[in-house]
Amino acid sequence: MAKHHIETTVNGDAVEFLCETEDTLLDVLRDTLQLTGSKEGCASGDCGACSVMLDGRLVCSCLVLGCEVGGRRVDTIEGVARGQTLHPLQQKFLEHAALQCGICTPGFIVASKALLERNPDPSETEIRYWLAGNLCRCTGYDKIVSAVKDAAVALRKG
Amino acid sequence: MRYEAPETVESAAALLQSTAGARILAGGTDLLVQMRGDVVDPTLIVDIKRIAETRTVTEEKGGWRIGAAVTGAELKEHPRLKNVWPGVIEAANLIGSTQVQGRATLGGNLCNGSPAADSVPALIAAGAVAALAGPRGRRDLPVEDVMLGPRRLALEPGEFVVSFLLPPRPPRSSDAYLRFIPRTEMDIAVVGAGVSLTLDAAGTITAARVSLGAVAPRVLLVAAAAQAIVGSRLDKPAQDRLEAAARAACAPIDDKRGTVEFRIHVAGVLARRAALIALDRARTA
């Protein structure tokens, strides 16, 4: 069986790749496109470490097939910073020490960015519910929630 | 393993019929997990998301038609659905995390064939009808008749769910869905209860449907529970009759998430609470 030839957009760039049917979008991002920021935690949609945006919608890339994304728009953690300038969320995660081992962090940043784009001033409850699909075994979440709140303030100020 | 993403219902049905071991891909939140766990090993994946009918929400004959592959997140953001069918929308939005909501669909939740599927009791209570397409054409099937048992559906070979039709809503109608889980978020229902009802101008229930999930091999439409409250204003005796009828319909399993005794008890409690929420919503609908 020939591989699928897929043309898509990743972080604003036109990209093409070959994949097998069973390859997930996460497999393609990490192993084919060398975009290794998205992490594989559980490979079953439970941990959120592989979170990406697909056509502007937050999804787990481990639950998307690579061949599904033809003609669609994929945005990953690699597209969050602007060159050497960190996104306010990334900056605030550093300032609040909202990470330890760092495996969950790309997923948290992508998911938090999706939240703040929809809701620039979320309550703590809204933040915690939105991020309930992102698991962190190091921080206990409080520092992450603080970082997201602080980033929201920074983004509202512009 | 082949992958096809047909753009018409007819070509999807032809693909499904021609290939033994084909599986439908909608949101993939069950299928991809089952593939990863070697529970299923399809020869062909038919992605139905490029068929426009599966991806749209439209008004039809005073009701609403919801494509089988519309996601939970899209349902939540729809400007009008949650006012007309708050129970259906809250049930769909209970499934999984934000990420899962971005992919999970009503069609997939039904066709995964789990008796604990959250959106199914709400759809059954709503009187939703599944629009099926297959090699022999199209037909409609009430949602309560789609599932036969765990992982077993009443669909013919090659048949799939294209959309759901939610019926027109009379004035003073509403619905609600509640489930019990041992934690606050993202778990599988130990019991689920959906109730839809209509009131007359005096506040008496003139029509009702009650559905229970996770208390039998399939999601149940409990006619006796609906009869227990029709003609009442859901006063205490009617609530007691509803609880008793809901419990009488249960035939649950014992497992680590709930005993038979607990599930039967909770089914009555949730049916009553869901009915009270639906009643409250119907008064202002």
Image (cartoon, coloured by chain):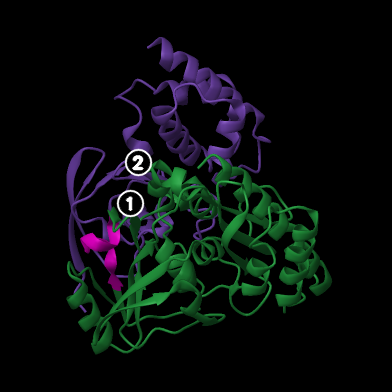
Chain colours: A purple, B green
Marks 1/2 in contact by CB < 8 Å: the verdict is yes
Check the residue under mark 1 and report the chain it is in: A
Q: Amino acid at mark 1?
A: Leu
Instruction: Identify the mark nearer the N-term, 1 or 2.
Output: 1
Picture residue at 60% right of the left edge, 35% below the top: A128
Picture residue at 37% right of the left edge, 80% below the top: B42
Quarter of the view holding residue A4: bottom left
Q: Quadrant of the N terminus of chain B?
A: bottom left
Q: Is residue A87 left or right of residue A73?
A: right
Q: Is residue B185 in view?
A: no
Check the residue under mark 2 and report the chain it is in: A
Number of the label disc, if any, that sits on residue B247: none
How far apart marks 1 and 2 lie (CA) works out to 9 Å
**Helix, strand or loop at disc 1?**
helix
Question: Nearest the camera: B98 or B215?
Answer: B215
Q: Is residue B207 in view?
A: yes
**In the image, farthest residue toward the front:** B202
Question: Nearest the camera: B165 or A18?
Answer: B165
Q: Position of residue B249 (x, y in %)?
A: 70, 76
Quarter of the view holding residue A134: top right
Q: Which residue is mark 1?
A: A29
Q: Which residue is mark 2?
A: A76
Q: Nearer the viewer, mark 1 or mark 2?
A: 2
Residue B47: in magenta span: yes
Question: Nearest the camera: B58 or B281?
Answer: B281
In the image, the segment drawn in magenta is B46-57
Position above or below: B260 against A68: below
